[in-house]
Image: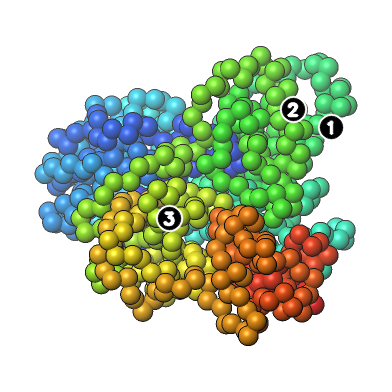
Amino acid sequence: MKTTTTHVHSQRSLTLLLTLFALGGCGEDTQSAVVGDNPSATEGVTPNTTPSSVAVQWSCAYTNRFSSAAECKDFIGDGWTLSSAQSDCEVQQDATFAEEGCNLTASLGQCMLEGDTPLATNLHFPGQDEGQCAITQQGCEVFAGGSFTPSALCEATSDMLSGEPAPMASGNNVFYPPELLCAPPLDGVPGSSENDEVCTWQSIGGCTEPGRVFTDYASCEPVLTQRPFFAVPPSTFKTEAGDPLYEDAEYQAEVQWVKGEAEACGCVCCHTSELSPRGAAAFDTAAEGIWTDSFTERGLAIAAGWIDSSPLGAHGSIENNGFDRSATGLPTTDAARMIRFFEGELARRGVDRSRFEGATPVGGPLYTQQTFTPQNCANGEGIGDDNRIEWTGGDARYVYVLNTGSENPGVPPNLDKPTGTIWKLDVDSRTSPIATGITYGSTPDNTFQTVPRQGEAPALLQGETYYLYVLADVGAPITRCLFVYEADGETENSTEADPVAIEEGPSTNVAVWNEPCAEDTDCDATADYCVKMPGDVQGYCSKHCDSSAACAQAGAPSSWTCNAVSCSIPDFTWCGPAEEIADSGNFLSQCD
């Protein structure tokens, strides 16, 4: 489904940038994906003249907000005016506008976007690393839908990449959020979820049950929107023929176990040549011989947990069929066993852990976004006296208001709702993004509030400083700044009451039962369990239960029921609003 937007040229530019960082699937590094990593804005990029044969009216040199890479854009379409080109440039970071073309001292090539429209632009990518040529061209042609003109440095690589492009992912590369899918088991062996079904998170880090295959219960099409794909060549390492490992039954069993772990998860969508759009990326579970030979040494280090890959996000093991990625690059049901295997693979290549000491965490821009320090808003950004939220950089799919000092939002499922999030609005991924100027606490058409999970947006305090964080899509921030709230805090869509709106019964202690919490220790003894939905850092205080009657007897709100992932496991039950069951797609059930 193609997303319609009034800023098509900006959308495709963003798509290209999304591609340039997100090459890997499950923890594999994307280090070479970003064209340049110098955060010092436009070094080496100066508006002057351009070697392009296309007529250039104006240009803008800037630092890409997403990748921190220096870029330069020529405005070449006859639909641009001086005013509109300047406006487009002004919202960029560290921008310099000029009434002449871009001139790069060293370039990988140019990408023409919307070349057949009045708003055509030409992006220039600085660089001298030939190894970045392929991804730059693929990002332009396959994912951004542009036309790539290689520099002399990249001409040879460009010739090798000629041919039909890989198919576009679903949604024109709009990030499709993780979705929990439940289905009857294909092999007739009862699943571990309610009604003996197999439940699988359809996401890059989601996993089906051990011993099953991810693609039997989920689709790779939406997964590829979560890590736009490019076939990064695997390692050339090869275990020599006749090596005793080929006949070592214990070793071969471990190789197959690791393969089974990988193929139970969304990793297969990018890392199995039989499934990937255009060959496996970085390693291939279908490689002949010992398939883990296809890992690069850095990839092995990531898989072993020697290099931090947490910026890529991960599901918790309880919700992910026992698969955990907190200590390893690949999700696994046995972290110690996985680490032991990959450390063994590194050892047989003669690689010591000291080689990766101090290595930058995996994720490229996803990591640098974590370390970003916001500054004061400018250009009218923030929330005004009329409670309208203003941002720059284009239309948005995610809008946050956070407390100052909060961590920067990251990727789903566990990094997109950091502690300190006051309000978060999401746009349905199947619809167009929204323009600036929405009212704080409102939910325009095709949007939904995800923080707080229930109830109205908390009132903001006059004179307090807050953090506005707006993304064009996951991983693509367009506004990140601090503002002082000057309104009186009273809006038709906000309340100073507890963020969870509850209908009280005569015996209800609302303050106890709905008090926000991050851990069980935050809750009163009456309601001593902190209920947090998958990926949420904040929940509400409640209590384990075995029936809705037990919730009522304990003093829970009268409209609450006993909800559960599994009624037979007490730790997976809690008293909560009845609508949670419908909101979960009936993954949850009511215990009576």
Mark 2 lies on residue: 340
Q: Out of 512 and 109, give the one closest to the viewer.
A: 512
Residue at image coords 39%, 25%: 129
Q: Are marks 3 and 1 in contact (CB under 8 Å)?
A: no
Classify residue 463 by image quadrant. Answer: bottom left
The residue identified by callout 3 is 473
Rendering coords of residue 178 (x, y %): 59, 58
Q: Amino acid at mark 2?
A: Arg
556 over 15 or under it: above or below: below
Residue 271: numbered disc: none
Q: Give neighbour class at mark 1: few <14, some 14-19, many 20+ (Cα, 10 Å).
A: few
Find residue 460 and report its horizontal and vertical position in percent: 36, 66
**Mark 1 is on which residue type?**
Ala
Nearer to us in this view, 539 or 148 = 539
Q: Is residue 4 visible?
A: no
Instruction: Give the mark nearest the N terminus, 1 or 2.
Output: 1
Please give the residue where the numbered disc 1 appears in the rendered image. 253
Q: Position of residue 491 (x, y in %)?
A: 34, 76
Tell me the element at label 1: helix
Find residue 318 and report its horizontal and vertical position in percent: 71, 53
> At 58% across and 17% down in the image, what residue appears?
354
**Residue at 35%, 38% in the rendered image:** 68
- Tell me the SS state at disc 2: helix
Res 293 → quadrant: top right
User: Foreground residue, 137 or 207?
Assistant: 207
Q: CA distance from mark 3 to mark 2?
A: 37 Å
